[in-house]
Image: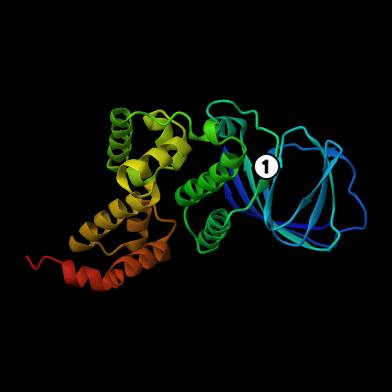
Amino acid sequence: MPVDRRTLLRTDDLLLADVLCGGAPRGWTPVRPATVFGLVMVRRGLVRGRVQGVEQVLDPASVYVERLGGEQQFAHPCGDDVYTEIVLSEPRVAALLGGDPAVPEGLVFTTPELALSHRLLLARARTGADAFELSERTTAVAARILAQLAPSRVASGLPRAAKARRLVDDARAALGTGTGTTQSLDSLALAVGCSPHHLSRVFRTETGTTLTRYRNRLRLARALDRLAEGERDLARLAHDLGFSDQSHLTHTLRHATGHPPGRLRALLRDPR
């Protein structure tokens, strides 16, 4: 069956892909073991699955939890299907489930909140959001899904207030260094000694905003200072602050302030 797979994010622990299964054959596919742990969210179409011999229906109101090594086969009774796939490494699964990578059995149904988070993730990926933001959003979607199967395990490990504040302060200090805003979410979490999901969850609880938004505030402040100092090399400025390219920098500044970089330079430039 022809499969058109567009990879939107790829890191050592995460993969996010937009997939079209076209020209689906009649009947069931051959039985094959799952080679990854994945979360499959059908957006259009209907898929019938046999997992370890047990049949289930996969539609846009459910999530298929693909367990590593599980014997599976599929049928596509309505023809072409479109779905989003999130693949997680075993360490990332364990980090989301309180340290244990074993995923409980069960079917996950899509809530309105999950459906919206899923579509916002795709929208941000398609409009060029960077890997840091996509990693944070993808991990949050995966956590919402797994919370339906093991809510106590996903919620476990939330640190006490003092420890949480120290963790957030450490993350803010790491972001505040000269090249802090250019590092990935995984490297930031490693620097402060916790998982990316744990860091994102605690940071939002303590500050009321996401790591991505906080990092963007720091990048915006630094960009304004550099423009005030007369910076004209926007490609270099974008690189120094961790933007994907000059157009990403320009779009962010215009969205945040209402002005393009050239106008901001003129408004902020010290005549001395």
Q: Residue 44 or 22: which is nearer the viewer?
A: 44
Q: Does residue 94 appear to the left or right of 237 in the view shown?
A: right
Residue at the top extreme of this rendering: 100
- Quarter of the rendering containing residue 33: top right
Q: Residue 245 or 64: which is nearer the viewer?
A: 64
**Vertical placement of residue 96 versus 6, above or below:** above
Neighbour class for label 1 at 10 Å: few (<14), some, many (≥20)? many
**Vertical placement of residue 109 versus 197, above or below:** below
| Residue drawn at x 36%, y 57% as measured from the top left | 238
Where does the C terminus fall, quadrant-wise? bottom left
Residue under label 1, please give it: 38
| Residue drawn at x 79%, y 51% as measured from the top left | 57
| Residue drawn at x 21%, y 57% as measured from the top left | 225
Residue at the right extreme of this rendering: 27
Q: Where residue 101 sits: x, y (%)?
A: 61, 28
**Vertical placement of residue 77 versus 202, above or below:** below
**Vertical placement of residue 27 versus 246, above or below:** above
Amino acid type assigned to the residue bearing label 1 in the image: Gly
- Number of marks: 1
Q: Where residue 1 sits: x, y (%)?
A: 85, 56
Q: Residue 182 or 162: which is nearer the viewer?
A: 162
Q: Does residue 89 appear to the left or right of 198 in the view shown?
A: right
Q: Where residue 49 sits: x, y (%)?
A: 82, 47
Residue at the left extreme of this rendering: 272
Judged from the image, the secondary structure of the residue bearing numbered disc 1 is strand
- Quarter of the rendering containing residue 168: top left
- Quarter of the rendering containing residue 254: bottom left
Q: Where residue 147 sits: x, y (%)?
A: 56, 40
Q: Does residue 23 appear to the left or right of 186 in the view shown?
A: right
Colour mode? rainbow
